[in-house]
Image (cartoon, rainbow, N blue to C red):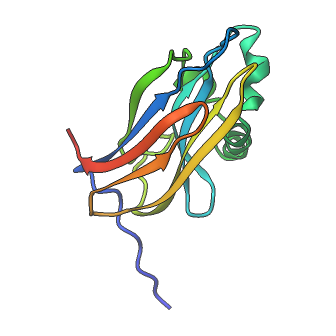
Amino acid sequence: MFQKKAPVWNKQLELLVNVEINAAEGGRYRRPYVAVWVEDGEGFPVRTLSLWLQTRPPGPRWFPDLRRWFRSDRMRQFTDKTDLIPVVSSPTRQPGRYSVVWDGNDDQKKPVKQGNYTIFVEAAREHGTYQLLKKSVLIGDRPFRTDLGGNVEIKTASLEYRRRR
């Protein structure tokens, strides 16, 4: 039987991910490592949008603390044999509001198909907590807004699938 192929991402739209890092209470504060990424409907990692961590020692020893992203990225490496950390990482962030945009391309800069995706926001902090927010969304031709909620490390997170700016 002939199956219709899903259309590719509508290039007039983009997905904005808003993240607010919570201010920690107490004396010993280290900025959290934060990963924002996308997995397809089968749970395969499609795109790492943001990776805020310390890449110089002793930072790398804490990469696995981003548990879900780290496992997901190891799975991705079996397919494309590249290390994303030197390519997409940037320094950790102070408490505050930040935004990242997904343009509809995968990690190899190829457009993805419309369909179901899960957006993840993960945070881990030395002398702090581990937190994971996720939301399944349908990427198609209709704009939307939705909240991911918040937790100890990520005060708020939201998604806005909107016209490209």
Q: Quadrant of residue 30?
A: top right
Image-based side of 45 in relation to 62, left or right: left
- For this orientation, the residue located farthest to the front is 26
User: Is residue 146 shown above or below 24?
Assistant: below
Seen at 41% across and 44% down, the residue is 158
Seen at 34% across and 56% down, the residue is 9
Q: Quadrant of residue 67?
A: top right
Asked whether the viewer can see residue 109, the reply is no
Q: Position of residue 39 (x, y in %)?
A: 56, 52
Seen at 22% across and 43% down, the residue is 164
Q: Quadrant of the C terminus?
A: top left
Image-based side of 125 in relation to 136, left or right: right
Number of labels in the image equals 0
Q: Position of residue 160 (x, y in %)?
A: 33, 48
User: Is residue 53 shown above or below 27?
Assistant: below
Asked whether the viewer can see residue 116, the reply is yes
